[in-house]
Amino acid sequence: MTSSSVPSRKVLSKIASNRLQKEVMEWQTNPPAGFKYKVNDSLQRWIIEVTGAPGTLYTGETYQLQVDFPEHYPMEAPQVIFIPPAPLHPHIYSNGHICLDILYDSWSPAMTVSSVCISILSMLSSSPAKERPADNDRYVRNCRNGRSPKETRWWFHDDKV
Amino acid sequence: MEDEEEVRLEVDAVQAVYGDDCCLIDEFPPHLTVHIVPRTAEDSSQQFVEAIVGIRTSAQYPKEPAQVYVIESKGLDVSRQKYLITRMRQKALELDGCLMIVALCEEAVEVLSGMNHPEGDCPLCLYPFFPENANLTLHPFMKLMSCYHCFHSECIIRWWKWIHEEKNENEAHGMSSVGARSQRGRQPIENRHEENKGNCPVCRKEFDKKDIEHVLHYTGSNLTIQLGEETDQIEEAEKELLQSKSEDDRRKQFDELLKLQQEKNGIIEPKKDLVVQPGMYISLPTPQPATDAAAEEEQEIGAVDSRADGTEQTNEVAAPHNKQKNANVRRKHRMRGSRKQQHHPRKQWVQKEVGNSSTSEQ
């Protein structure tokens, strides 16, 4: 139980890898708009390119998401972070960590990479201002030794953005 | 006003049939809602869809057909809802000029009974409930009573056990540890802490432990049989079985029997059946007194029959809520049941051995 902090160390369970194969197939036939899955060898780490939706503060900008799957995915949430440089957003820290409840407390095994991506894009799209979270510096300092965002005790105090 | 009298009588009839499921909004001209469920012989665990439909008539009814609409439904996606309403409207047109409220309700029951099964994929493993390839094993599924979201029984149970184990771990570790799992345990919004409650993975609606209790035994100790993984395990188990001595003996016996029958121009049909029946694998590994004995035709058949029955029975116990009327589906279920049993061959055997030895003693 100790270390979900290093989700990529443990191999995927058979269930997890079956499920991920399904997700890859579904993604290939029906990718979420605005996202590109960059094919690599590892089922366990996906690199996904996001393009800001038209008509939003991030129009035309592209960012990269890194999705790491834990051994017991989808019972456990994947770890999703932006590979810096992360978009300027009140809920995205400069180290790429994303404050979004469905990635932590509100994760449900019925969610998929695709649905998570859509949530992230929607979070970006509804941003009122390109700025960092107020506690960005402190948080990033605390995470310096490569801590996973899944270890953070997140406070989800704002569902407007 | 004869018409009005007839119309009122018709509404009485609907109320009599549907009881509390029928709710009268306007007496005249009648406007009512009816809670429609498929015919499942009162077994609510076998009900995967339902709908509340509204039927509204004008003052000209029955000269003008009734209007129908769906107020809410469970287990039906948009296209299936549309299908339901289309069928009801077609019925209304067919019966134009006649009293039709009763017939419309019956049509709705008919349509729902015809599509009383979940659609698409299990939200947890993403594998379809009904594989396109009919040769694939059909995995038992179930729905949550509160929201009618469906899951493979194994998938939902695996998840249920996961969240409850997680909870226990959190308690054991005094919540002091940081990590995703303890994070989830702290979840304030949902009642995950509560022993007997869960939240639907799809809609988060709370459900009660008793909703899934009837499938808890599925996984019991052999939670290891999991989707996908199962295939490999089966292959191995099958291989082992197929290469076992008892199976070799058996095959020889059947070959001889078959030869005999062919020579005699005999009926080979039942034999063929026996050979292909999926449930049969189960009984193979046990050295049966009957099979050990010389291949006496009748005895052999008797033994096989009783074994096949045994399979069916165990399966009924294992999957009481997944009985299907369709014979094909049933067969697949049996196959699944039998596969599961391979993980407990000894247990199974003990039981059977007892039965068999007692019969042979007689």
Image (cartoon, coloured by chain):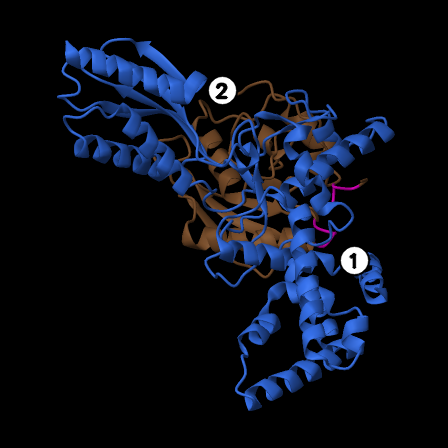
Chain colours: A brown, B blue
Please check the rendered image and state whether residue A131 is part of the magenta-colored stretch, yes or no.
Answer: no
Tag 1, which secondary structure? helix
Nearer-the-camera pick, A11 or B30: B30
Question: What label does residue B159 carry, if any?
Answer: none
Q: Is B258 rendered above or below residue B60? A: below
Question: What label does residue B348 carry, if any?
Answer: 1
From the viewer's perspective, is A53 left or right of B135?
left
Place of residue B266 in the rendered image (x, y in percent of width and height, measured from the top left): 54, 83
Near mark 1 (Cα within 10 A), the count class, few <14, some 14-19 or many ≥20, is: some
Q: Main secondary structure of the magenta part?
A: loop
| Residue appearing at x 22%, y 15% in the figure | B6
| Residue appearing at x 41%, y 50% in the figure | A30
Q: Chain of mark 2?
A: A
From the viewer's perspective, is B261 left or right of B163?
left
Nearer-the-camera pick, B209 or A10: B209
Circle 2 residue: A160
Place of residue B216 in the rendered image (x, y in percent of width and height, measured from the top left): 70, 40
User: What's under tag 1, amino acid-wise?
Assistant: Gln
Quadrant placement of the N terminus of chain A: top right
| Residue appearing at x 61%, y 34% in the figure | A107
Please check the rendered image and state whether residue A4 is part of the magenta-colored stretch, yes or no.
Answer: yes
From the viewer's perspective, is B76 left or right of A1?
left
Near mark 2 (Cα within 10 A), the count class, few <14, some 14-19 or many ≥20, is: few
Tag 2, which secondary structure? loop
Place of residue A138 in the rendered image (x, y in percent of width and height, measured from the top left): 69, 25
| Residue appearing at x 79%, y 68% in the figure | B286
Residue stretch rendered in magenta on the structure: A3-11
User: What's under tag 2, amino acid-wise?
Assistant: Lys
Q: Quadrant of residue A86?
A: top right
Q: Is label 1 on the same chain as label 2? A: no
Q: In the rendered image, is residue B77 in sight?
A: no
Q: Is B20 rendered above or below residue A149? A: above
